[in-house]
Image (spheres, helix red, strand yellow):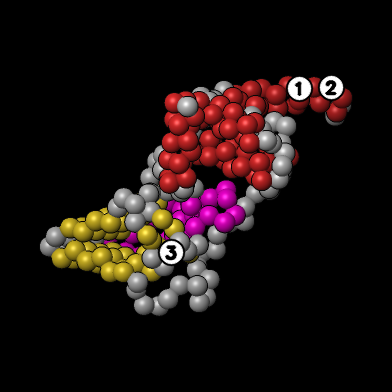
Amino acid sequence: MDLQKHAPVQDAAARSTATRTSELRASDADRDRVADMLREALAEGRLTADEHAERVEGVLAAKTVGELDVFVRDLPAAHRDRGPAAPAPNRPTAGAVPLEADENVVAVFSSAVRKGRWRANRRIHAYAVFGSVEIDLSEAVFEYQQVVIKAFSVFGSVEVRVPENVSLRGTGGGVLGNFEVHTLDSSEPDAPVVYVDGWAVLGHVEARPKRGRVVADLLDRVHRRVEKGLRKHL
């Protein structure tokens, strides 16, 4: 094989891929990632306060990934190779999660819902008996790195929704029922891991990511946008 002939082709393919990536629409998670790099650069003295404020304003207004990259192109954090995160284990770490439930969610001939901005406990037990339970962690505050949800469904349903940037594992089963967990691996090494276990007896248990939802510090994001508004008025 003539490597010299193939190298330009490979370089062209890499440039084409990079171009397509830079043209992608930026998400709130992308903006938060770049804002974190700018805060780090400000703390290290690489940026002045005025430079930091100017770049943050540009980050909030950026529409594509390529526009975001411009603001951190000259910072070491943008070129740091973190490497791929190791897959989450299939079982929680021994002793990290208590054997007793921190919270019980019960629906007997009824429905029960946990959603919105709430604090996820280390162990949650969900019981659906001729009823339905919905546990939505897409906007939850994760104070612990490992969360266990023990789901029991008897002629009922338990639905678990998680953000797209956490890891999700399942080890339950079904008896004339359906127990389904959509396994998910986060690219972040310190991302929370949600373990769904239990049984579905003539019932249904399902756990999957909620599209478009990610773990983020919403209060910090609001604070930055308020600062931007104040700067415009001043």
The reply to whether the C-beta atoms of the residues labelled 2 and 1 are less than 8 Å apart is yes
Name the quadrant containing residue 132: bottom left
Mark 1 surroundings: few (<14), some (14-19) or many (≥20) residues within 10 A: few
Name the quadrant containing residue 226: top left
The quarter of the rendered structure image containing the N terminus is: top right
Q: Residue 197 vs residue 188: left or right?
A: left
Residue where numbered disc 1 is placed: 9
Measured in 3D between alpha carbons, the distance from the residue under mark 1 to the one under mark 3, in whole angstroms, is: 47 Å
- Mark 3: which secondary structure? strand
Q: Is residue 184 above or below residue 126?
A: above
Measured in 3D between alpha carbons, the distance from the residue under mark 2 to the one under mark 1, in whole angstroms, is: 7 Å
- Amino acid type indicated by mark 1: Val
Answer with mark 1 or mark 3, whichever residue precedes in sequence.
Answer: 1
Residue where numbered disc 3 is placed: 147
Does any portion of residue 230 appear in the rendered image? yes
Mark 3 or mark 2: which is in front?
3
Q: Position of residue 173 (x, y in %)?
A: 36, 65
Q: Is residue 83 above or below residue 46?
A: below
- Amino acid type indicated by mark 2: Lys
Residues drawn in magenta: 166-194
